[in-house]
Image: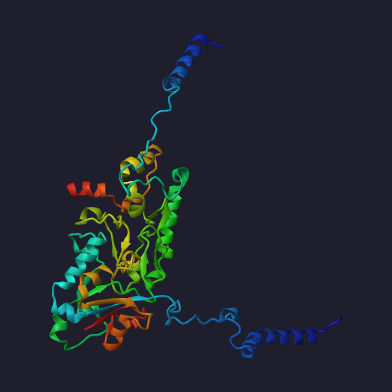
């Protein structure tokens, strides 16, 4: 092989450059989403959601879609019980009644996972209204 | 078996006659026991009758125009009440106009009831019009995504999530009850109601008879804002003992474009 020294040295430099981000961040999981659960806000002292945390983490979108179809198509608008309380089958009047802060609750994970659900094209939060009314 | 050509033709001819005649013979023998469709009848089922038997509810309205003439500000109150709770935008240009409930002159509202010498009241006043929530709605028939549909209460509803903005329903509706969002409506909403969604660009919208209020046993907003003066009476048209049916029994009422056979559920006392 001609110029073996140069080639091997070049390869080594290339490898180190390519791996440098991984080496730099080793042992660090990076920024993680930290959705904020409601504390004092919402119905007082509520600790329980309509489904368990794990289900809500992975499948809340399924539940929301089911609610939408039941409410709109089948007219099944009866409230959903959880922890002795009744909740409206509604994004704004249900979910967002307790989880009032969309930025800290919804967007936290959605931004991290790079998903842009189109809920907010139409549904509008109280914070968004405040911002729009400022304009 | 040995069969001659002549015999074969006889058998074939007889069996084909039997084959053609059998359904008619069966229908005569067992009248009504077979559904029509099973006998490949080519006549489509009657269009005049509404698709569903009137087992469920069919909400409707009687608008007493005399009371709107007596109180000229009342119609605007109804419009404001409806448009504010449903986040209806107010576009400056008329060509972008979004309307759920609005006022229109007699000749536009009742195109099939022309009057050469109409009374001054009819000539000058404007009529409160809204979606007629027809018993046989053409908009529902044409919607390719089933975004608009008839719910169990007979209300013609829209699922904004599913609307693709093809505007077939706008072409089908003979009452002009549907409006299209040509641009993002949010900046044009005067006062927001967070409990009801806004719409996005490219979606059709219309009156929903306040389905979200009816679900909570409230009357539609336009009815409520009229107070107890019965300018608008709301109720179930399929219930023979409802207040609305009593009013229809006692008064001469007209519907908009009844000749189209859509069976509008909004009646007017003029």
Q: Is residue B34 above or below residue B202?
A: below
Residue found at x 45% / y 15%: A13
- Counting every numbered tag in the picture gives 0
Q: Position of residue B64 (x, y in %)?
A: 22, 80
Q: Quadrant of the N terminus of chain A?
A: top right
Q: Position of residue A127 (x, y in %)?
A: 25, 46
Q: Kindly indicate the quadrant of the structure image that contains residue B244.
A: bottom left
Q: Is residue A49 above or below residue B75?
A: above
Colouring convention used in this rendered image of the protein: rainbow
In the depicted view, which residue is nearer to us: A40 or B255? A40
In the depicted view, which residue is nearer to us: B32 or B155? B155
In the depicted view, which residue is nearer to us: B21 or B181? B181
Residue found at x 42% / y 55%: A81
Outermost bottom residue: B28
Q: Kindly indicate the quadrant of the structure image that contains residue B118.
A: bottom left
Q: Is residue A83 above or below residue B249?
A: above
Q: Is residue B212 visible?
A: yes
In the depicted view, which residue is nearer to us: B264 or B191? B191
Q: Position of residue B233 (x, y in %)?
A: 27, 77
Q: Is residue B14 left or right of residue A53?
A: right
Outermost right residue: B1
Q: Position of residue A113 (x, y in %)?
A: 41, 39
Q: Is residue B114 above or below residue A55?
A: below
Q: Kindly indicate the quadrant of the structure image that contains residue B52.
A: bottom left
Residue found at x 30% / y 45%: A41
Q: Is residue B144 visible?
A: no
């Amino acid at each position: 092989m001609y110029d073996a020294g140069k080639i091997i040295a070049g390869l080594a430099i290339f490898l180190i450059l390519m791996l440098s981000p991984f080496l730099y961040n080793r042992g660090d999981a990076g920024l993680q989403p930290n959705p904020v659960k409601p504390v004092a806000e919402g119905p007082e002292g509520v600790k329980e959601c309509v489904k368990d945390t794990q289900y809500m983490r992975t499948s809340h979108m399924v539940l929301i879609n089911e609610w939408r179809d039941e409410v709109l198509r089948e007219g099944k608008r009866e409230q959903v019980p959880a922890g002795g309380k009744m909740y409206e089958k509604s994004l704004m009047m249900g979910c967002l009644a307790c989880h009032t802060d969309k930025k800290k609750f919804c967007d936290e994970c959605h931004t991290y996972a790079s998903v842009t659900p189109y809920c907010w094209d139409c549904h509008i939060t109280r914070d968004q209204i405040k911002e729009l009314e400022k304009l | 078996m040995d069969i001659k050509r002549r015999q074969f033709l006889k058998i074939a001819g007889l069996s084909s006659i039997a084959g053609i005649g059998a359904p008619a013979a069966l229908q005569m023998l067992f009248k009504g026991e077979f559904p029509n469709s099973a006998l490949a009848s080519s006549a489509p089922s009657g269009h005049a009758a509404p698709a569903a038997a009137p087992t469920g509810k069919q909400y409707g309205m009687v608008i007493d125009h005399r009371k709107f003439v007596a109180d000229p500000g009342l119609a605007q109150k109804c419009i404001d009440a409806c448009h504010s709770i449903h986040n209806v935008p107010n576009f400056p240009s008329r060509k972008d106009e979004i309307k759920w409930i609005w006022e229109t002159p007699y000749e536009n509202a009742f195109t099939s009831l022309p009057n050469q010498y109409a009374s001054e009241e009819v000539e000058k006043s404007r009529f409160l019009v809204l979606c007629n929530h027809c018993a046989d709605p053409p908009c529902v028939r044409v919607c390719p995504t089933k975004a608009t549909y008839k719910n169990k209460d007979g209300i013609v509803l829209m699922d904004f999530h599913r609307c693709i903005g093809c505007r077939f329903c706008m072409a089908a509706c003979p009452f002009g009850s549907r409006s299209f969002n040509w641009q993002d409506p949010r900046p044009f909403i005067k006062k927001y109601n967070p409990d009801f969604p806004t719409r996005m660009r490219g979606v059709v919208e219309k009156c929903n008879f306040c389905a979200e209020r009816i679900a909570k046993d409230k009357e539609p907003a336009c009815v409520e804002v009229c107070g107890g003066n019965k300018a608008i009476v709301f109720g179930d048209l399929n219930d023979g003992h409802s207040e609305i049916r009593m009013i229809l029994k006692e008064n001469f009422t007209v519907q908009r474009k009844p000749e189209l056979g859509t069976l509008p559920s909004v009646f007017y006392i003029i």
